[in-house]
Amino acid sequence: MRIDVADLKKSPGESIEVELSSHLPDLEFQGEKLSFDGPARVFAEISNTGRALIVKGKVTGALKVLCGRCLEPFSLPLEVQLSEVYYPADDEDFPAVDPSAEEAQEWIPFTGNVLDITPEVLKSILLEMPMRFLCREECRGLCSFCGQNLNRATCTCEREEIDPRLSVLKEIFKN
């Protein structure tokens, strides 16, 4: 996701609105490769403060994931906020920014007239990922004995679930 900022760099105090759509590379999350279900979209405003370019907006899209309960694939919709500050690493039009200054420690350097926001878009998505993917809140998961997907059918397992640590108590109650 690349944005031409040549004109904006010459106009301190100005801002532009952009809408981008692009296929993003796969993400690595908790040891799994996750791919996007179609293109991701970015709606953002880019402002020139005179010292830096501020990018604020939102990212929407969907990821192909597996449910953490039933292991069925589904499309997880995403909508995350994007807020980054870019400073030109070596440009005469902008005052020099000391990267060690407290305010600039999280700023992102760029060169030329094009911002590539793809790494920050991916970072923003990763930061907003849920700990566990669920196809729906009421997902019943899999039977722990036979593996039947309990969302599709009930299993016919005959089982008496007893915690093995408490099996001694079962013997006491038999007497």
Image (spheres, grey):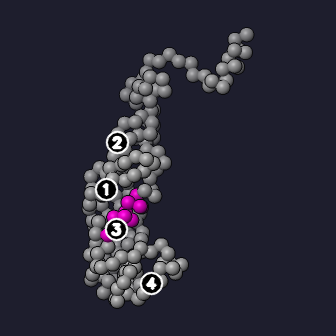
Q: Indicate the amino acid at tag 1.
A: Pro
Q: Indicate the amino acid at tag 3.
A: Ile
Disc 2, SS: strand
Which residue position holds label 2?
74
Q: CA distance from mark 2 to mark 3?
A: 27 Å
Q: CA distance from mark 4 to mark 1?
A: 31 Å
Q: CA distance from mark 2 to mark 4?
A: 45 Å
**Could you say which disc has been placed on residue 25 in the image?**
1
The answer to the question of whether label 2 and label 1 lie on touching residues, with beta carbons closer than 8 A, is no
| Pair 2/3: label in front | 3
Q: CA distance from mark 3 to mark 4?
A: 20 Å
Q: Indicate the amino acid at tag 2.
A: Phe
Left or right placement of residue 38 versus residue 120 in this view: left
Check the picture and name the quadrant holding the N terminus.
bottom left
Magenta stretch, overall SS: helix
The answer to the question of whether label 2 and label 4 lie on touching residues, with beta carbons closer than 8 A, is no
Q: Indicate the amino acid at tag 4.
A: Val
* Mark 2 / mark 3, whichever is N-terminal: 2
Q: CA distance from mark 2 to mark 1?
A: 18 Å
Disc 4, SS: loop
The answer to whether residue 58 shows anywhere in this view is: no
**Could you say which disc has been placed on residue 97 in the image?**
4
* Mark 2 / mark 4, whichever is N-terminal: 2
Q: Which residues are magenta?
A: 116-125
Which residue position holds label 3?
117
Q: Position of residue 70 (x, y in %)?
A: 42, 34
Q: Residue 77 magenta-drawn? A: no
Q: Position of residue 145 (x, y in %)?
A: 48, 23
